[in-house]
Image (cartoon, rainbow, N blue to C red):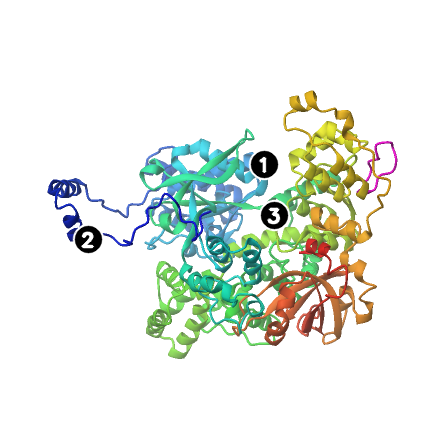
Amino acid sequence: MQTVDTPFPGRPINDRQYLTSAAELAAAFADLPEAVAETLRIADACDQMHLTRDRFVPSFNGAAADEQSGLLAQLVEAGLRERYPRRLWAKVRPRLAEELRIIGALGLAGYFLLVWDVCRWAREQGIRCAGRGSAAGSVVCYVLRIANVDAYARDITPARFLNEERTESLPDIDVDFARDGRDHVLDYILRRYGAAHVAMTGTYVRYHVRSAVRDLGRALALPPEEIDSLAKSLPHLACDQLEGREDVYPDLRHSQWAAPRFAMLRQVIPRLAGIPRHLGTHLGGVVITEAPLADLVGVQHAARLWETQEGDWQPFAVIQGDKEDVEDRLTKFDCLCLPMFSVLEDANRWVRARQPGFEVFDLPLDDEATYARLRRSETHGAFEVGSPAQRALHARLHCDCFEPLVAALALIRPGPMHTGMPEHYLRRRHGQEAIDYWLPELEPVLAKTYGVLVYQEQVIEVARIAAGLTAAEADLLRRSISHYRSREAMDELGRDFCAKAVAQGHSAEVAESLFESVRGFAGYGFCESHSAAFADTAYRSVYLIEHHPAEYFAALMRHQPMGFYPVHTLVGVARRRGVRILPPDLNHGPARTEGSDSEIRLGLAQIKRISVATAERLVATRPHRTLGDLQRAARLPRDQLMCLVRAGACDGLTGPRGEPAHRRMLLWLVQEMPRLPDEPEEAEGRLDLGNLDPAPDPRLREMSEWDQVAGEWDVLGFSPTAHPVALARRAVERYGLSPAAVVRGSEPGTAHRVCGLVIRPHRPPTKTGRNTLFFDLEDESGVIPITCFRDVYQRDGQVVLHNPVVMVAGRVDDRTGQGLIADRVMALPNHEEFASTHARTLY
């Protein structure tokens, strides 16, 4: 990389950093007037580019518009008969007819058929899929089996998704596919519609503070170790949000940000706010066009690859622009990856092996034990409801059926949280606050949420009923509010809303109160259809945790990384449920992690640097007696051998002479083993494979327990041997520490001191706007949530953010009765094990 001290040699040095004027050019070419004249002639001959607002909607199989509409209507009618009982057909048809009318008016019949075709193919291949977002609120999507939310039964308005008056963008459909099948779906789309007609949408990755520090630091030739240390010490903020924020972020005060040697960084970084760093690939946005894409937009090959059905890896074309650049002219289909579908599929398969006929996706949503687990907030590792914020909400929500679960997913969002909606919802649900619908006409809309605005669809219905807007106009109002308008623009929207509400005969006071609640969605809120879709998946994950923990947590470990919690937390939860965790075993374990009944057998692919293909090769070539046997059969790089040893997978091997082998001996043997050449022919011709078993040094002693735990933690993400806090328990007993399990069983307000690993510290938005630090603390007995309010965060936040293990003194939270409200947070610098270099593996 070129630095400011070593400019690019091919760039000429000059003093003109501006566009030369016409007069200067004429003077410079005074001796060649014909050159100037020829330049003007060529410029005049160029055609003017006319940018159009034409929309390019794909057709299905090249059919005409009326043929596509007819086919869609046939499929919808067939789906109606499959999805609904006969007694509801006549009631559902008017809703379907209205949606089909809007689809036809927008010219989207071909688009719906295209998405239906992709979902149909995925189901035929056994790839789990389901629609999410606003599209899940469409009854057409439900009967086409694009989505699984019954929008008719839930009485969800279609205006959030289908709006014929929307002019700035076309509606798009988001569909989740299982992680291990999503690339096959992309391959099908590419083969079905042609490489020239398919591309992923791009996304501009913009500079934030940490990436700006790293890139600018390299350009300024700062030492790499200083750049890395500084970047890690800074909060995750936009480039123009650092200046003068030392009083807000303690990690900024304790960093080297103010050091004189970083003066140039401090001067330049704010200028990078909003500047794109590079063009990335959208997570799932796929654009399909009838005309070649290159005739409509710029495209390039993405760095990202996807796997074809033949097992090859191919680059996907990506549009040179982000999704906002294409949404107003091209139809986008979000082909998203949901790892939880793969988890549920694997767990379902293992349970079905013991219980033929079991199908987790067909279970009714009425299991009392599942709701009891939600009420106890014992949902670590569950989909969407396992985060600390969701668990704190469920501790007070007392969920006893599906509807509060749907609301919970929408309540823990920036918009509702900023306006205090969760507190109003909880108090009204428990009869501690009177339910107020503002207007009697709004009761049917707000009854399911106790008069609290929770969903985007409710905003549309409130605007339609209270202000007399059409459904399309109400959705435009919602979109306008959601785009973070300035205060002046928001006030203008409020005046217009109130005037229309008063014109409908409502009081100015009611109109203003309604708009204040509506404007809360200037922060991001969920639509009901999306919450219902995710709540269905969340329920099934909690059901498996309650009834089949071994299968569920084995599947969760197999598909890491995913979710809120690291793997060591998930392992601890499984162990406390009575699940036995068997370490990876080179000669007896599976290639990939498996679960059955009350046992999880870790697979070799769970080990760092060991791919699934490598793990399967190791299983296929066993048994292995010594490291030499292993290397002759599998021919692994040295770093992979060391990872296998550190994970304990080689504990069953012997030394070269059949003597018992401990891990330190095996690591020494790996280091002494001759390096194998890359080519097998070269190895066979030049290396005596019989020399792969060097004699061990007799002075080698077994590892300490701490070294063994640290090694396992580094390559597995946890330790099958012991929890690191358990190893330190005796050394820290003098502090009078309570295990996490004791804290969870204590009365609210009880004082405790606890010690544990810091899990996922974060600073979400709060109603007061004050920074509050939340994190979980994990020891060998459990996990407890910790809350550091402003004063404690300002004083001790740096300790939490930059130490893997901390000690917390505090009192049990009065509201949830589970976590601690911290009074003090301290590091453990004097404990030799946590202060050693091995502690880095705990980060």
Q: Position of residue 823 (x, y in %)?
A: 68, 75
- Left or right, residue 669 beside residue 552: right
Please name the amino acid that badge 1 sits on.
Gly
The Cα–Cα distance between marks 3 and 1, rounded to whole angstroms, is 15 Å
Instruction: Kindly check if marks 3 and 2 are in contact, taking CB atoms under 8 A apart as contact.
Output: no
Tag shown at residue 302: none
Tag shown at residue 126: 1
Circle 2 crowding by C-alpha within 10 Å: few under 14, some 14–19, many from 20: few
Is 654 contained in the magenta span? yes
Q: Which residue is mark 2?
A: 21
Q: Quadrant of residue 597?
A: top right
Of 280 and 244, the residue lying toward us: 244
Badge 1 element: loop
Q: Position of residue 817 (x, y in %)?
A: 70, 70
Q: Position of residue 280 (x, y in %)?
A: 45, 47
Badge 3 element: helix
Please name the amino acid that badge 3 sits on.
Met
Q: Position of residue 722 (x, y in %)?
A: 79, 53
Q: Which residue is mark 3?
A: 340
- Left or right, residue 554 beside residue 317: right
Q: Which residues are magenta?
A: 651-663
* Residue 650 shows in the view: no
> Would you place residue 834 above or below residue 113 in this image?
below
Of 482 and 501, the residue lying toward us: 482
The Cα–Cα distance between marks 1 and 2, rounded to whole angstroms, is 65 Å
Badge 2 element: loop
